[in-house]
Image (tube, helix red, strand yellow):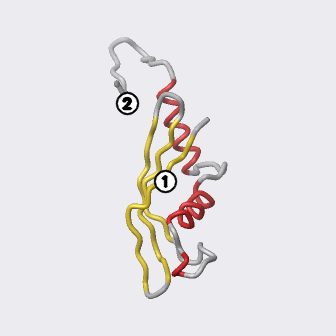
Amino acid sequence: MTKFEWKILQTSSVGDQLVSVHYLVTAKDDANEVQSEGHADMREKLDVAFEDIRESTIVAALEKMYLTDEKGSLKLRLQEQLDYLKAPVSNDVPWKSQIFSVNF
């Protein structure tokens, strides 16, 4: 089962409105982990007063926005990367080098 861990790196606000968040999300399974860093527009995404916003409030909003099963979602893209790391290495022909390979 894949676990997602969020870290809020920076927030931007105008007056008493949170407008954007810079985040780092880590997806982990039993053997591997992958990360994605990005910015999210947070205008009108939170239903709490500015002074009541906590990191957990922002994380819950990010999960609602990005951890969906819609095609191309951040959740599915991170899962795709984890699945790639589990796949056996295979080349089309012996003389063709791999485009992407992770060695630990």
Residue at the location (59% across, 61% down)?
60
Please identify the quadrant where the C terminus is shown.
Answer: top left
Residue 40, relative to residue 82: is it above or below? below
Q: Is residue 21 left or right of residue 72?
A: left
Q: Residues within 10 Å of mark 1 (few under 14, many from 20)?
A: many
Please state the horizontal and vertical placement of residue 45, each as a whole percent of the image. Answer: 59, 72
Which numbered disc, 1 or 2, marks the residue closer to the eye?
1
Q: Which residue is mark 2?
A: 100
Q: In front: 55, or 84? A: 55
Check the image and report above or below for 55 versus 29.
Answer: below
Q: Residue at x 63, y 60 (%)?
A: 64
Q: Secondary structure at mark 1?
A: strand
Image: 7 above or below 86: below
Quarter holding the N terminus is top right
Total marks shown come to: 2
On the image, the x and y values in percent for residue 30 come to 53, 29
Give the residue furthest to the right: 69
In the rendered view, does 69 fall on the left or right side of 28? Answer: right
Label number found at residue 6: 1
Q: Amino acid at mark 2?
A: Phe
Residue 35 versus residue 100 in the image, above or below: below
